[in-house]
Image (cartoon, rainbow, N blue to C red):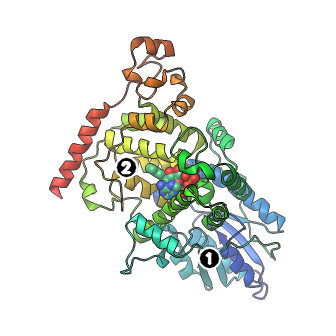
Amino acid sequence: MTTTAAAPAILWFRDDLRLTDHAALLAAIDTGRPVLPVFVLDDTSPGPWALGGASRWWLHHSLTALRHSLGGLGAELTLRRGDSVAIIAEIAAQAAATDIFTGGSVDPWARRVDRAVAASISGKLHRMRTTTLFHPDSLRTKSGGAFSVYTPFADACLALGGPCVPSPAPATLRTAWAPRSDRLEDWGLLPAKADWASGLRDTWTPGETGAMERAEAFLSHGLAGYADARDRPAGDGTSMLSPHLHFGEISATQLWHMVHRRPPGESRKIFIRELLWREFCANVLWHNPGLPEAPLKPEFAKMLWRDDRPALIAWQKGQTGTPIVDAGMRQLWRTGWMHNRVRMIVASFLVKHLMLPWQHGEAWFWDTLVDADLANNAGNWQWVAGCGTDAAPFFRIFNPVLQGRKFDAGGDYVRHFVPELARMDTRYIHAPWEAPADVLANAGVILGDTYPNPIVDLAAGRARALAAYAQIRSVS
Ligand SMILES: Cc1cc2nc3c(=O)[nH]c(=O)nc-3n(C[C@H](O)[C@H](O)[C@H](O)COP(=O)(O)OP(=O)(O)OC[C@H]3O[C@@H](n4cnc5c(N)ncnc54)[C@H](O)[C@@H]3O)c2cc1C
């Protein structure tokens, strides 16, 4: 055990795996004590929201990068696996640490953990804002309530004039004794299926350096065209920064300021508004801890969802026979990410055309997305299902064929992720069941053999969804 004089300030990393713009790290340094960086992998406290497979892959690489950056400052990252409350309390006691600094999460389970840690240590737990632009409680409606509509929420954020200027990474770090650490390699975070990992590896560079490189590349080459390109899934129309933002390898504050150094215009404005959707989802979760499990509109609890496991599996595997849906689900499986427009299409298809509970989709995304984020995932699933705050009305049902024709007009996205349809005539690529026999033959497509027949008739699925919705409306 160390003496109190040399007792370190503990820096407990959470969803903020970076050294730049890290309020908790700076506060730990400001104590003048040596800093003891710790990360805990907790698979019990989150309950059903323990990290999914794709997130585990990301975390492994992100921690490797963080360890490397800390090593450059002469600091060791202590890694421990287990119950965060017990582990943080144990390390604090061993180190005789009186101050523990950490990033405040909006996730309900993390907030419960924070309360339990604060109660189980003799020192103080300092929760700093490291993930959102603003503290959720600093954003209130004029009457002092929580926001439930996005536009006034975004306007309120903009009226604050932006978050404070990000701080640079420390040039030095005073360190001291480090407790026993697990070996990252022993955590088994990498998937057993090597082919899955190879798709992730080809697409991403987790870590603070990878995040900054992607941000700079997007701001130099993508931002100017964002307003036009962001809805087209083929091509690089969006930043693909979501996993970096989720793991906090770049802060929303850093990104906000980087964007504001670019020339003003429509694209810049829209991009900032997308960042504010992230902020909105975090805010909604902060005020509605049940968001991941239960519909915010209570009448949706009465919805007669179907139980159809084969349909769910076909959706998960990208074998629904609806090309834009299959392309999206295969992009997700191959890369751990899916374009936002296509997320909306596949989600609408699951919840409305298949009438399967949105929680099934949420759970699959949780396991397979590298950017799986409790607030964004739950908030967006509820938005698509029509049961969240400021959600799309349930009766607005995306037609996946029309969506495909509008946003993937040349069919390039489908051709890329559904190679069975690569030679299909563009006129029929989004609805191969409408193609004449000779067109199918020329493309080498045999429906029901080389590519599935549709698992649902779109018109019938739509009618079924509307009938189910009418029923909950009539009984509520
Ligand atoms: C059903 C469904 C589930 C989703 N699940 C997640 C999730 O688990 N994690 C996640 O980060 N996003 C989720 N999203 C939101 C959105 O699809 C992704 O944030 C976006 O596609 C990420 O790509 P990008 O970084 O290129 O986005 P860009 O267009 O470059 O936007 C920049 C950033 O703004 C934020 N953002 C953009 N759109 C949204 C949005 N609709 N809601 C919240 N934040 C947004 C993200 O942090 C994103 O990185 C989901 C959307 C849907 C429809």
Residue 65 location, x and y as percent? Answer: 74, 57
**Count of numbered labels shown in the rendering:** 2
* Residue 318 in sight: no
In the picture, the disc for residue 358 is 2
- Tell me the residue at 57%/70% (across/down): 133
Asked which secondary structure carries label 2, the reply is helix
Task: Report whether the residue tagged 1 is closer than 8 Å to ligand 1.
Answer: no
Does 370 sit above or below residue 375?
Answer: above
- The one of 96 and 132 positioned closer to us in this rendering: 132
The amino acid type of the residue labelled 2 equals Trp
- Picture disc at residue 387: none
Q: CA distance from mark 2 to mark 1?
A: 38 Å
**Element at badge 1?**
helix
Rendered location of residue 327, percent (x, y): 50, 34
Quarter that holds the N terminus: bottom right
Q: Tell me if residue 107 comes above or below residue 331 in the rendering.
A: below
Q: Identify the mark nearer the N-term, 2 or 1.
A: 1
The residue labelled by disc 1 is 89
Give the position of the C terminus as an image quadrant: bottom left
- Residue at 51% across, 71% down: 158
- 2 vs 1, front mark: 2
